[in-house]
Image (cartoon, helix red, strand yellow):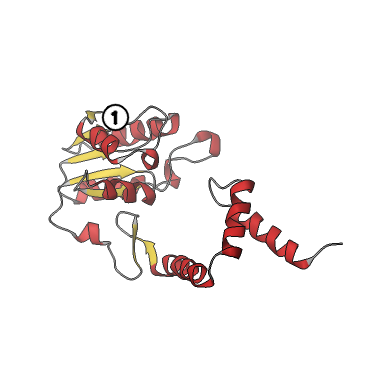
């Protein structure tokens, strides 16, 4: 016999397991936490998720996140920041770098990496928008804060070459010692990020 409440729980587990880095066991624990937690706590969690989804949108300049209707984002509008652009893979990288307090320049989110195996070419990323920003703006440095992986290296080299082709007078660097090979920004602590930014190298 199939009981309806078991089907409800299984549906919740399947949905939770579809989230990044959440396996079936963790999804099961989360589902039962939701069931057993005080309703007020679950309601607050749900309200926060809805607010995040409803109130945020991509910045039209750097492609990180901003409050809906506030364009460009607060960081892009802050004229006190250093005249450099830190190029990252995702908005989550911006969150981690800002939280570390190790950088005070601007950002540009590519929304991915060049990956021939996955069919992702330069045209699918925000590279052309980056080049346009560099041509229009008065920037001194581009920091390629992309992961030290095959796709990250390929993307960094492609961007550096495109900048050289346009003969833009600025320094192009990559994160240096501190970020382990194959790792990503979201797994680095504040000290590691600080060292990687401090020891960045010309490319």
Q: Name the quadrant containing residue 1.
A: bottom right
**Which residue is pictured at 70% across the width and 58% down the height?**
10
In front of the other: 96 or 123: 96
**Which residue is pictured at 64% across the width and 60% down the height?**
12
> Looking at the image, is 12 positioned above or below residue 26?
below
| Relative image position of residue 20 (x, y in whole percent) | 53, 48
Q: How many marks?
A: 1
In front of the other: 201 or 162: 201
- Disc 1 packing (10 Å; few <14; some 14–19; many ≥20): some
Q: Residue furthest right?
A: 1
Q: Please, what secondary structure does the residue beneath circle 1 have?
A: loop
Residue corresponding to mark 1: 178
> Looking at the image, is 87 positioned above or below residue 165?
below
Horizontal arrangement in the rendering, residue 81 relative to residue 193 (left or right): left
Q: Name the quadrant containing residue 186.
A: top left
| Relative image position of residue 125 (x, y in whole percent) | 41, 46
Q: Name the quadrant containing residue 30.
A: bottom right
> Looking at the image, is 167 positioned above or below residue 56?
above
Please identify the quadrant where the C terminus is shown.
top left
In front of the other: 38 or 58: 38
> Looking at the image, is 89 positioned above or below residue 174?
below
**Which residue is pictured at 12% across the width and 55% down the height?**
80
| Relative image position of residue 105 (x, y in whole percent) | 20, 48
| Relative image position of residue 115 (x, y in whole percent) | 48, 36
In front of the other: 74 or 154: 74
């Amino acid at each position: 016999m199939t009981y309806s409440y078991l089907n409800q729980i299984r549906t919740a587990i399947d949905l939770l397991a579809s989230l990044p880095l959440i396996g079936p066991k963790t999804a099961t624990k989360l589902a039962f936490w939701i069931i057993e937690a005080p309703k007020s706590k679950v309601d607050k969690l749900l309200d926060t998720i809805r607010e995040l989804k409803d109130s945020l949108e991509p910045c039209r300049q750097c492609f990180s996140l901003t409050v809906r209707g506030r364009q460009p984002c607060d960081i892009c509008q802050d004229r006190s920041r250093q005249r450099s652009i830190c190029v990252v893979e995702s908005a989550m990288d911006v969150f981690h770098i800002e939280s570390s307090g190790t950088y005070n320049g601007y950002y540009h989110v590519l929304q991915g990496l060049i990956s021939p195996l996955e069919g992702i070419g330069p045209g699918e990323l925000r590279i052309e928008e980056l080049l346009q920003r560099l041509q229009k703006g008065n920037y001194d440095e581009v920091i390629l804060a992309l992961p030290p992986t095959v796709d990250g290296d390929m993307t960094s080299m492609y961007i550096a070459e495109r900048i050289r082709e346009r003969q833009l007078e600025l320094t192009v660097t990559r994160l240096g010692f501190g970020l382990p090979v194959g790792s990503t920004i979201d797994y680095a602590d504040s000290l590691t990020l600080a060292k990687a930014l401090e020891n960045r190298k010309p490319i």
